[in-house]
Image (cartoon, rainbow, N blue to C red):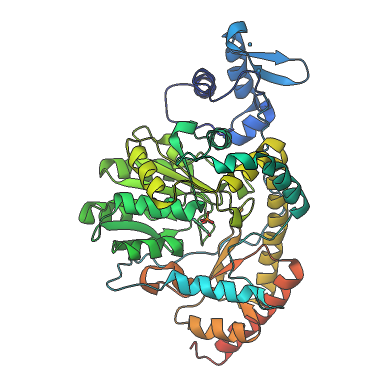
Amino acid sequence: MKIPLDRQADTPIYLQIRDRIQHLIQTGHLAPNTQLPSIRTLAQTVNVNKLTVLEAYSVLEADGLVRAKQGAGFFINPPEQRAVGTVKNDAPKPFAAPLPPATFNPAQTVLIPTKGIHTFSNIYAASLQSHSEAETIDFGLGFPQPTGLEELQRIARRAMKEAHTFFHPGDPQGDLGLRSQVSQLLIQQGLEISPENLILTNGSMQSLSLLVENFVSPGDWVIVEAPTYHGFLSILQQRQAQIIGIPMTPKGMNLTLLAQYLESHRPRLIYTMSTLHNPTGITTQSAHRRQLLALAEEYDCLIIEDNAYEPLSFEITPPPIKAFDRSGQVIYVGTFSKTLMPGLRVGYLAVTSAAAQSLIERKLLHDFHISAASQAIIKEYLASGHYRRRLNQIRDRHRSCRDFMLSTLVQHLPPTVTWTVPNGGTFLWIQLPDGTCLDTVCSAAAEQKVLVGSGAAFFPKEQGYPALRLNFSLPHDATERGLKILGNILQQMENRGSKS
Ligand SMILES: Cc1ncc(COP(=O)(O)O)c(C=O)c1O
């Protein structure tokens, strides 16, 4: 459970924790008999002393809102007893081993394309093609490795017991039961979102399309991070929006430049990925999140916070920007594509403003509602209790893969190459020396059956510096072979002294 804390506020931290939990209990977000996270886990999650959490729990107990059970922890009382379920905190453990450092330090150039940008459909088509080719090492792919298939099949079979309901008309907002489950997951991320504030969508891609359709008119300015998720760039392009790419620093979007461009261009919205940004893997800290929100509020600019990779963080992350939003300025977008299966096509958006109604109407007109079968499978999966275990397994695997890729990069890539060190997700962002011809790198690698994500796709109008996005979740032997080949190509280009 994450709790947005204001360390500058006059209210002591233990009371802020008490207030938040009290609020979640009183608004029904934490159900009677739910177990609170252990004192140790919550202290780790919100980065405070264990005594502070103990103090907060003791006040809640004194207020009759929770009860302590010897050796088992604290539980929420049902209203009639002023004394309750099982919200186990599975906050990921911080990692211990020293890692090769992040060396990412890009030039801070704002990018404003004047003409069209690359087409996402070409990139998607290349990805489809690579799947049909055996022996290709595909670092370019953004999909998770297929794991836990037997369990998924068992759960899907159980979910089909609901098949008779697939003949009924569905709720355009999405199944209420599943929305309730998603809202419980979001509470663990620090978001106070009720089922009424959620719209289930065909993957987060549809959330992004609906939002752009709803809020952006042709010719409107939109701010994105540079680099950013290329799928969103294409949605903007199709909408004929004008794009401003504000450079990423190692700590997130450059806020000084953001302030300047909010003032000069008065954009309609800001698109940001605060946790495990795609493609750099950067996670911003609380202060950055609050500052970004304050700027958006000052200029009355909507924020889309797309945290597709949030559940895959190895470390405890601060609550999302949406957790600090009191005026409905932020719309939070999430997905099950990265944690369960992309093919189920289930994502969601959390919206707490009056815009919800028009978004639900749009959703109805697009496709009535998302697949009833997919909803039934995810509902069953979440109810089975396997989801937490699955997340832990994916995180453990990805952490080992990330560490392996980092050590292999040091071994095989020339020292002129720099990279980010993401604390989760799936990608590493590799910056190549200025002037390196990306097309040459990508096609030389492809000739040797190694596919890499060309960094150009992630910049408005492909204008950024030369970079590659690498999926680190491949098996170790594939990572080793692929990086050796990539390292040789880059070394040879450097030796020739010609970067192109
Ligand atoms: C940041 C981000 N947002 C949205 C999506 C779309 O995901 P989906 O539509 O499968 O939920 C992706 C997919 O890679 C992504 O990386």
In the rendered image, the quadrant that contains the N terminus is top right
The residue at the point 62 percent across, 18 percent down is 32
* One can see residue 467 in this view: no
Q: Position of residue 60 (x, y in %)?
A: 58, 14
The relative height of residue 181 versus residue 418 in the rendered view (above or below) is: above
Q: Position of residue 487 (x, y in %)?
A: 64, 80
Query: Would you say 430 lies left or right of 408 here?
Result: left
The relative height of residue 396 versus residue 237 in the rendered view (above or below) is: above
Q: Position of residue 85 (x, y in %)?
A: 67, 23
* Residue closest to the eye, 412 or 19: 19
* Residue closest to the eye, 258 or 344: 344
The relative height of residue 343 versus residue 456 in the rendered view (above or below) is: above
* Outermost residue toward the bottom in this view: 496
Query: Would you say 484 lies left or right of 304 here?
Result: right
Q: Position of residue 37 (x, y in %)?
A: 66, 28
The residue at the point 35 percent across, 38 percent down is 357
Count of picture labels = 0
The residue at the point 69 percent across, 52 percent down is 394
* Outermost residue toward the top in this view: 81
* Residue closest to the eye, 334 or 481: 334
* One can see residue 326 in this view: yes
